[in-house]
Image (cartoon, coloured by chain):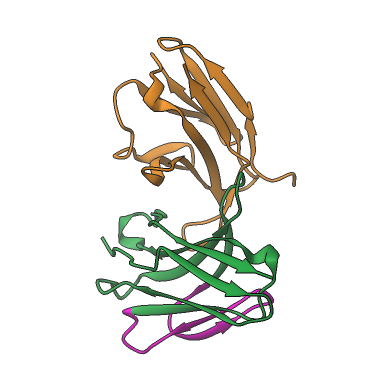
Amino acid sequence: LAKTTQPISMDSYEGQEVNITCSHNNIATNDYITWYQQFPSQGPRFIIQGYKTKVTNEVASLFIPADRKSSTLSLPRVSLSDTAVYYCLVVIYNQGGKLIFGQGTELSVKP
Amino acid sequence: DAGVIQSPRHEVTEMGQEVTLRCKPISGHDYLFWYRQTMMRGLELLIYFNNNVPIDDSGMPEDRFSAKMPNASFSTLKIQPSEPRDSAVYFCASRETFESTEAFFGQGTRLTVV
C-alpha cells in the first residue's frame, strides 16, 4: 500500500503561493496521484490528478518528479477561502482503485 | 445531476438503537464508497461497491456494521446496535469508472450516539 506523508499543517497569507509536498515512496507503476480539498462540515472535493511531470487546471498545479516518489500541490495566490484540509492520495489500481485518505495538511490562510 | 445525496444530515440516537444511513449516488457512476470521519482517526474507508457488488469491506470496524446496495441508485449503511464510539460523520461518495480518480462526496451524515 503506497502510504503518503504530508505536513500536518501550514500557514500562509493572502496572495501568496502555497506549495504542499507529499511523499509516496512506495508508489507503483500503475498508481496515480490525486489531491482533494475539504472544508469544514463538507465532504472532500477533487482538485487535481496526475501521473508524472506537471498538470495544471483552473484551481491548482501538480508537480511530479521523474521518480514519482513525491508530488507538490501548488496553489497560486491563495485567499482566505482556500483555508481547508488538503489530502494527497495514491490511487492503487491493482487494489481496485480504492481511495485511501491520509492525515491531510491543514492550510490556514491569514489576511 | 444533484450530486451524491445522503440522508439524514444529522442523526442523534441512543446507545443500542439501530441506525440506518442512506445514500443516492450520481446516476451512471459505477463505484460507491462509504467513509467515516472522526478527529482521532481521520477519514476511514469502510467499504466500497462496484456495480452494486461489495468489493472490499475490510474497513468495516465490526459485525455491528453492514452495508448494502440493492440497486445502482441506493445504498445503506446500518449500525446495529449503535455505540457512543460510532459517533462520527459518515460520508458516501461515488465515482464514475475504474479509471477515474475523481470521487464525488455527499454532504455527510453527522451521527451522535448518546
Please tell me which residue is depicted at 61% across the width and 53% down the height of the picture.
A39
Decide if residue A29 is on the left or right side of residue B96.
left
Please tell me which residue is depicted at 43% across the width and 43% down the height of the picture.
B39
Depth check, front residue: B32 or A4: A4
Seen as rendered, the residue at the extreme right is B1
Seen as rendered, the residue at the extreme front is A111
Q: Position of residue A14 (x, y in %)?
A: 68, 75
Question: In the rendered structure, does residue A52 fall within the stretch colored magenta?
Answer: yes
In the image, residue B85 above or below residue A108:
above
In the image, residue A10 above or below residue B4:
below
Chain A in the picture: what colour? green
Say if residue B74 shows up in the picture. Answer: no
Say if residue B114 shows up in the picture. Answer: yes
Q: State the extent of the magenta-drawn residues as a range.
A: A49-69
Chain B in the picture: what colour? orange
Depth check, front residue: A29 or A22: A22
Question: In the rendered structure, does residue B114 fall within the stretch colored magenta?
Answer: no
Q: Position of residue B32 (x, y in %)?
A: 50, 43
Image quadrant assignment for residue B24: top right
Image quadrant assignment for residue B61: top left
Total tally of numbered discs in the picture: 0
Q: Position of residue B72 (x, y in %)?
A: 57, 36
Please tell me which residue is depicted at 36% across the width and 89% down the height of the picture.
A66
In the image, residue B9 above or below residue A37:
above
Depth check, front residue: B4 or A7: A7
Please tell me which residue is depicted at 52% across the width and 20% down the height of the picture.
B20
Q: Position of residue A60 (x, y in %)?
A: 61, 77
Image quadrant assignment for residue B8: top right
